[in-house]
Amino acid sequence: MDIYEWQWYERLVPYWMEEGKIADDHGVRLCMEMHAGNMAFRPDKLLRLLEEVGRIIGCEMDPSHVI
């Protein structure tokens, strides 16, 4: 879990905050697709990312990827 938390706060959140700022500057939103193996694969993790980064991120949900 320590590695997961490090990756979350040291890599994932800073990366998407920067990308989100660029997207916001251009008037667009980012769309995530939840794939197995991604840090934000589950809905609760995507909501956690939204809390960290802001509403610049949305979700494109393809139910076949959750199986």
Image (cartoon, helix red, strand yellow):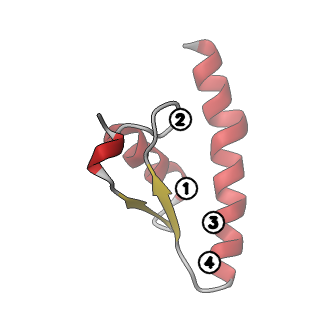
Looking at the image, residue 40 sits to the left or right of residue 63; the answer is right
Between circles 2 and 3, the one closer to the viewer is 2
Q: Give the residue displayed 53% in from the left and 74% down from the top.
A: 29
Question: Is 14 on the left-hand or right-hand side of 60?
Answer: right
How far apart in space, not on screen, are marks 4 and 2 (Cα)?
22 Å
From the image, which quarter does the N terminus lie in? top right
Residue type beneath disc 3? Gly
Crowdedness near tag 4: few (<14), some (14–19) or many (≥20) residues, C-alpha within 10 Å: few
Looking at marks 1 and 4 on the same chain, the residue that comes earlier in the sequence is marked by: 4
Task: Identify residue for label 4.
Answer: 24
Task: Assign a secondary structure to mark 3.
Answer: helix
Alpha carbon separation for disc pair 1 and 4 = 12 Å
Q: Left or right: 41 with respect to 29?
A: left
Classify mark 2: helix, strand or loop.
loop
Q: Earlier in the sequence, mark 4 or mark 2?
A: 4
Q: Which residue is mark 2?
A: 39
Depth check, front residue: 8 or 63: 63
Mark 3 or mark 1, earlier in chain: 3
Q: Residue at x 66, y 29 (%)?
A: 7
Marker disc for residue 20: 3
For the residues labelled 3 and 4, say whether their Cβ atoms are less than 8 Å apart: yes
Label 4 SS: helix
CA–CA distance between discs 3 and 1? 7 Å
Q: Residue at x 69, y 63 (%)?
A: 19
